[in-house]
Amino acid sequence: MQQRVVVLGSTGSIGQSTLDVIARHPERFRVYALAALRQIDLLESQIEQFKPAVVVVVDPVAAEQLQTRLKSKGAPVQVHTGAEALIKLVQNPEIDTVMAAIVGAAGLPSALAAAEAGKRVLLANKEALVMAGPVFMEAVRRSGAVLLPIDSEHNAIFQSLPAAYAANPAEHGVNHIVLTASGGPFRGYKKEQLTGVTPEQAVSHPKWSMGPKISVDSATLMNKGLEVIEAHFLFGLPADKIKVVVHPQSTIHSLVQYVDGSVIAELGEPDMRTPIAHALAWPERIQSGVSVLDLVACGQFDFAEPDLEAFPCLSLAFEALQRGGSAPAVLNAANEVAVAAFLDKKIAFLAIPDVIRQTLAAISDSTLTDLDSVLDVDRKARCYAESLVGVA
Ligand code: NAD
Ligand code: MG
C-alpha cells in the first residue's frame, strides 16, 4: 500500500528535496498534503505535479490568492489557512507520515501534534526538539510514534546505532558520539575577521544548500549547538558524551564510538536526499537520486577542533543543555531573533552570541510540562531578545 505523506514546509530546501525523492517512487508514496507559509508560485507547480488532496497556506492573504488561481483552473484541492490548520492536517487518520520541515519555532506545534497522533514523524525541524525535548519525546513514547531524524548528523547516528538501541547507551556499549561540522563559510576565521561579515557571505555555505536561517546557524556554529541538544534528546546521551569535530569535506556525517574501540559512521555525498530517502523508506532502502560516493575522488578527510573563541554559539548551546529545563528553549528563541535581525542588517554577526548570552542570563529557568509552557518561555525569551536588537 502507498504511504500517505504530508510535507510541512514543502516550498523550503528540505521540502523540495523530499518531493524530489518522492517523485522517484510514485508506487510507494502518495503526497496527501502540502503546507507552506506563503510561496504560492512554487506551491502551485507542486500541486500540479503531486495532486495533493489538501494544501495549507498559513498566510491568509496568500491562501486566498492561491484559492482564486486554483478555482480558475478547476483543480480539485482543498485550501486551508492558519497555523491551526496544520494541526488538524497532521491529526488526519488518512495520513501515515509527516515530514516536519517548517523552519524554526513555527514548526513545533505541528511536529508535536504529529508525534502525539502516533504518526511516522520525519523530523527536520530540529528547533522543535531543542525547544520542547522532554515534552516531544514523552509524546513519542506515549503514542508509539516512529521518530526518524532527517538532520544528516542524527540520521547518520541513527544508522550507526544498533536497531534495538532505544536511548540506552550503556547497554549497547556506546562510549560517545561525534557530530561532524563543516565549519561553515567562515571556517578558519579568527574573531577579528568576523567583524564585518555580511548576511550574503553567511548564507553561501560551502557544502550544503539550505534555507537562510540554518545557513546563518551554520556560519555561527549554532547549528551544531542546536544539533548537540537535538542528539541529547534523540539518543539519551548526556552533554559530555556528545562531541563535535570540524570536518570540512562533510562526507562523514557523524560517528558512534563504542567501548571496544570500534567506530561506526555513515558517509556519503552532502545531499539531504540521502537522509530523506532513508527515513521515507526505513527500514528498507530506496534510490534517492544521490550519486554513489567515490572514495578515491574524495582523496582525504580532515578533522579539527571547533574554534570556540571565534564561534561561542556552540559553547552557549552546551551551557543551555547543561542548565536543562527551559534554557534550550530560551537559547533557541534568542537565536531566532538574533539571526532574523542579522539577516535584516540590524545587528552585526558578532552580536548574535551576545544577544543569546544576555537573554539566557535574563530569563530564569522553569520546567517544561506541555506545549503551552514551552510557548510561554519562547514568548518571554523572544520579547527580551527583541528589546536587545531594537525590534520590540
Ligand atoms: P527553508 O527556509 O528553506 O524552508 C522553510 C519552510 O518552512 C518553507 O516551506 C516555508 O514556507 C515554511 N515556513 C516558514 N515559516 C512558516 C510558518 N510560520 N508556518 C508554516 N510554514 C512556514 O528551510 P530549510 O532549510 O528547508 O529548513 C527546514 C528545517 O529543516 C529547519 O528546521 C532546518 O533546521 C532543518 N534542516 C534543514 C537542512 C537543510 O539542508 N536545509 C538540514 C538539516 C535540518
Ligand atoms: Mg545537520
Image (cartoon, rainbow, N blue to C red):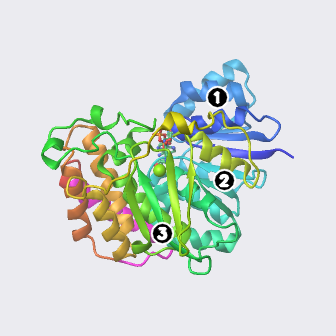
Magenta stretch encompasses residue 39: no
Is label 2 in contact with label 1 (beta carbons under 8 Å)?
no
Query: Which type of secondary structure does the marked residue at label 1 adopt?
Result: helix
Residue that extends furthest to the top in the rendered view of this protein: 72
Instruction: Estimate the spatial distance between the alpha carbons at disc 3 and disc 2, rounded to whole Å.
Output: 26 Å
Check disc 3 and report its element: helix, strand or loop: helix
Nearer the observer, disc 2 or disc 1?
1
* Mark earlier in primary sequence (2, 1): 1
Label 1 amino acid?
Gln
- Residue 46, which numbered label? 1
Q: Can residue 389 be seen by looking at this rendering? A: yes
Residue receiving disc 3? 232
In primary-sequence order, the first of circles 1 and 3 is 1
Asked if 65 appears above or below 177 in the picture, the reply is: above
Q: Which residue is mark 2?
A: 90
Element type where label 2 sits in the image: helix
Give the number of the mark in front: 1 or 3.
3
- Which amino acid type corresponds to the residue marked 2 in the rendered image? Val
Give the amino acid at mark 3. His
- Residue 361 screen position, x and y as percent: 22, 70
Q: Earlier in the sequence, mark 3 or mark 2?
A: 2
